Image: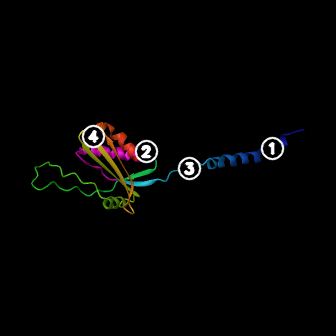
Amino acid sequence: MNIAPRMARLLPALTVSLCAIAAATPAALGAQPPPRIQTVAVLPPTGDNISPDLLHAAKDILKDHLQRSGVYTVVEPVMPPPPAPPAGSPPGTLPPSPDEPNALEAAKLGASVGAELTIVLRLTHFGSSARLRLTAYATGSAQVAYWDSILIAGGPDELDTAIERLVH
């Protein structure tokens, strides 16, 4: 008895069956669809008692962590120019630190670049510690979509870890 002709007839059916099982397995195991990518506008961080260099570094770190998460595309809106130093100030005087934008201002800036969310980071240094607050506003409604804060006591060395925790 020669089984080769029988195997030749079964091989295509077996191949199709195995392919169907392999294709259905992820769905049967509850595999998640890929995450939806959101466009977020990152505004320059604001702060009290924080050097401009640290604010700039905080913005770079925030953008990196958002992009690394794999669910955000980061854009930056064009910011209005900072206010001029008060009249009669000595040459070289820095303008006052801009205040944190309110919800409507943040949403408007985010909408100007087509973002779904606008991210605002606020740093406040006091004594030997600092607090970081991250707020995400929905650009369509100016409502708070996410809010969290974290206290750091180790100085600028903890900035990366703290921002990473706020993003995730």
Secondary structure under the numbered disc 3 in the rendered image: loop
Q: Which sits earlier in the primary sequence, circle 1 or circle 2?
A: 1
Most foreground residue, 128 or 59? 128
Q: Which sits earlier in the primary sequence, circle 3 or circle 1?
A: 1
Q: Which sits earlier in the primary sequence, circle 3 or circle 2?
A: 3
Q: Residue at x 33, y 56 (%)?
A: 77
Say which of marks 4 and 1 sits in front.
Answer: 4
Q: Which mark is residue 8?
A: 1
Q: Amino acid at mark 2?
A: Arg
Whole-percent x and y of residue 55?
Answer: 28, 46
Secondary structure under the numbered disc 2 in the rendered image: helix
Whole-percent x and y of residue 135?
Answer: 35, 53
Q: Which mark is residue 68?
A: 2
**Residue that label 3 marks:** 32
Say which of marks 3 and 2 sits in front.
Answer: 3
Q: Which sits earlier in the primary sequence, circle 3 or circle 4?
A: 3
Most foreground residue, 165 or 115? 165
Q: Which sits earlier in the primary sequence, circle 4 or circle 1?
A: 1
